[in-house]
Image (cartoon, rainbow, N blue to C red):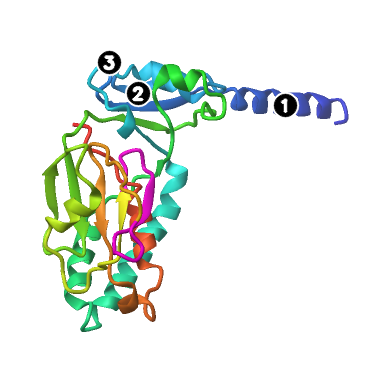
Amino acid sequence: MNQRLPAAILGMMLAASSHAASPINIEALGSVRHPGMHTLPTDARLSAAALAAGPDEQAYMLGAALLRSQAVPAQARLKAGVLFDLELLAAQSSTAEAATHMQRQFQHMPVTGRAMQMLDPRPLEATLAQNTPAQNGDRLVYPRRPDTVSVIGAVLKPCTFRHDSLTSATTYRAQCPAFPAANRDALFVIQPDGSHQKIGIAAWNRQRATSLAPGAVVFVPLAEHLVRNIAPAINEEAAAFLATQVLDAR
């Protein structure tokens, strides 16, 4: 019995070692030379995944997205919270129409699992802090460069405008009719890389104009004094969820 124990332990150690060294699978989508599944060594970094995908000349690097299953549960909770708060606001007369409209918008948005990440292969190779280990199940999405900017949120209907580098977020917002419950003092800008920021647009809090990249989204929030006592975090959480969306890669 005692002679068998070391052999059993050795077998378990070898099995564990073999499992730890198992290769990982990633998927490449969009404007890439090698779409589909790729098998990489267990210690591969994201630069290896990006090189395996081989983004082509039409790939829009600013909109490239890393999708990870580990991020899905938290984002699913975030979406559920946004929808719950909008349902509460839909029962309040001052925000009912706008909240109901926004609820329909967010209901149809997918939970992506997007993680903010540079995915341009060569710069990624040279940036150790960004070039983190790839994970099994990672999906790398490389969309084509869009030529539009969208305005959504507390607006009568979503608006899409041709991108103009000289046009400010405030100007885009002014061209898209809004509900009376819309915030007139601030808006959110969601850039195609998944970053987002709140911008003051009134005379008392106006901030320096932010340049919008092609594919950016201008989110018109609800007036803060109307949501403060019911769902004070709704605007920030809605903007955070919008930042997880991914440009169309078809």
The Cα–Cα distance between marks 1 and 3, rounded to whole angstroms, is: 40 Å
Q: Is residue 205 magenta?
A: yes
Which of the two discs, 1 and 3, labels the residue nearer the N terminus? 1
- Say left or right for 199 vs 45: left
Cβ atoms under marks 2 and 1 closer than 8 Å: no
Q: Which residue is mark 1?
A: 13
- Specify few, some or many for label 3: CA neighbours under 10 Å numbering under 14, 14-19, or 20 or more: some
Q: Amino acid at mark 2?
A: Met
Q: In what element is the residue under mark 3?
A: loop
- Say left or right for 241 vs 156: right
Query: Residue, x 22% and y 32% (percent of image)?
Result: 249
Nearest the eye: 185 or 140: 185
Q: Which residues are magenta?
A: 190-206
Which of the two discs, 2 and 1, labels the residue nearer the N terminus? 1
Tell me: residue 118, above or below residue 177.
above
Instruction: Return the x and y of residue 91 as percentages of the image width and height.
Output: 24, 82
Label number found at residue 195: none
Query: Residue, x 47% and y 22% (percent of image)?
Result: 124
Query: Residue, x 41% and y 60% (percent of image)?
Result: 77
Tell me: residue 87, above or below residue 42.
below
